[in-house]
Image (cartoon, grey):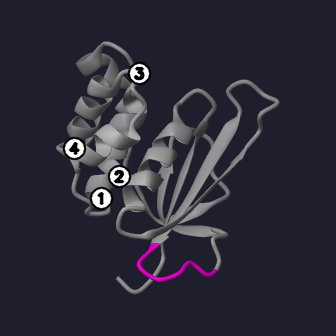
Amino acid sequence: MNKDYKIIVAGKGGQGIKLLMTVLAKILSEKFNVSLYYNYDSAIRGGKIFGFLTFSKEKIGDPLILNGDYLVNLIVEDVKYMGKEEFDLEKFDVFAEAEEKFKTNKVANMMLLGYILKKIEIEIDKGLLDKVLPEKFKDMNIEAINYGFNR
């Protein structure tokens, strides 16, 4: 790996984007240099939130992301920030599948995390997940990450 990889996740407040991106950054920081920042409207409940993550084996020169390598769009409207590859969430409705499999859509973000890890070819380390995930709902979150990864 000799370049920066950039991931953009776009969603709405309450979808768990900050937790998803924070956990992803912690996982990637074990082997890569990582930069993570958010852009969101905290004044509006359910407002748009964007997570921008860059990871690289090299030092990250400019963490600003205008166009990512990957775009995960959980917003229905058009997104101004684009990715070279958009995750096909029409075939993987994380909210509906989370509700069906786990009886709650609150783990949809963790299912999506597993799916992202698979797409960027990062193996799941259960010991690391145990370290980086919050205690609340940890077992269900690990199960959801594995579900998304194996999907």
Residue 113 seen in the current view: yes
Amino acid carrying label 3: it is Lys
* For marks 2 and 4 on the same chain, the one whose residue lies earlier in the sequence: 2
Report the residue marked by disc 1: 119
Specify the farthest residue to the left: 150
Does the residue at mark 4 contact the one at mark 3 (Cβ under 8 Å)? no
Q: Which residues are magenta?
A: 56-61
Gap in angstroms between the C-alphas marked 4 and 1: 18 Å
Most foreground residue, 132 or 101: 132
Which amino acid type is marked by label 2?
Ile
Q: Which residue is mark 4?
A: 126
Foreground mark, 2 or 4, reads: 4
Q: Quadrant of residue 28?
A: bottom left
Foreground mark, 2 or 3, reads 3
Labelled disc at residue 116? 2
Please tell me whether residue 8 belongs to the stretch shown in magenta: no
